[in-house]
């Protein structure tokens, strides 16, 4: 966690995140992590809930398929799960989980 003595300039972090995203720079992850770490009012909680639901779906599916090493499978799919969860969460591209859209 970021010490209290260290206060981030949230506007600068957000601006840097946007610039990294526009440039395809993987440093975007660092800026996003800093923003999440300083989130004291829980504004990222809805996205975390969407990721949790998506991970739960995948773990249950792997169990049904008899996956013997879900950690390896999860490692291979985490980024796609995050992208899918973000679409579920923001409602722009879909209104539910794939196959369950209304």
Image (tube, grey):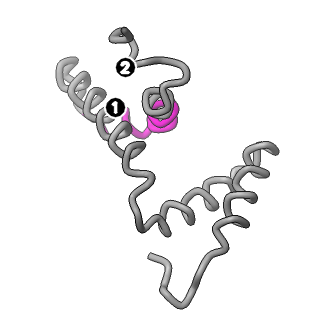
Name the residue beneath numbered marker 2: 97
Q: Residue at x 54, y 19 (%)?
A: 93
Q: Per the image, is 5 magenta?
A: no
| Element carrying mark 2 | loop
- Is 33 left or right of 85, judged from the image as shown? right
Mark toward the start of the polypeptide (2 vs 1): 1
Name the residue beneath numbered marker 1: 54
Image position of 46 with respect to 63: above or below: below
- Going by the picture, which residue comes out furthest to the right? 23
Image quarter (top left, top right, bottom left or bottom right) of the N terminus: bottom left
Query: Residue 98 placed where, x, y %?
Result: 40, 14
Residue nearer the viewer, 66 or 93:
93
Q: CA distance from mark 2 to mark 1?
A: 8 Å
User: Which-is-in-front pick, marks 2 and 1?
Assistant: 2
Q: What is the magenta range?
A: 69-83
Query: Residue 75 placed where, x, y %?
Result: 42, 40
Q: Does residue 53 appear in this view?
A: yes
Dot 1: few (<14), some (14–19), or many (≥20) neighbours within 10 Å?
some
Main secondary structure found in the magenta portion: helix
Query: Residue 91 placed where, x, y %?
Result: 48, 25
Image position of 65 with respect to 88: above or below: above
Query: Residue 38 placed where, x, y %?
Result: 49, 69
Q: Residue at x 49, y 32 (%)?
A: 90
**Proximity of marks 2 and 1: CB atoms separated by less than 8 Å:** yes
Number of marks drawn:
2
Q: Residue at x 52, y 32 (%)?
A: 83
Q: Does residue 76 appear in this view?
A: no
| Element carrying mark 1 | helix
Query: Which label was assigned to residue 11?
Result: none
């Amino acid at each position: 966690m970021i010490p209290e003595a260290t206060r981030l300039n949230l506007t600068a972090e957000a601006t840097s995140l946007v610039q990294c995203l526009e440039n395809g720079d993987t440093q975007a992850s660092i800026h996003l992590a800093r923003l999440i770490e300083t989130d004291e009012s829980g504004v990222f909680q809805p996205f975390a809930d969407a990721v949790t639901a998506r991970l739960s779906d995948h773990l249950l599916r792997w169990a049904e398929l008899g996956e013997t090493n879900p950690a390896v499978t999860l490692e291979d799919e985490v980024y796609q799960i995050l992208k899918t969860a973000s679409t579920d969460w923001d409602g722009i591209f879909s209104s539910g989980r794939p196959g369950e859209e209304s």
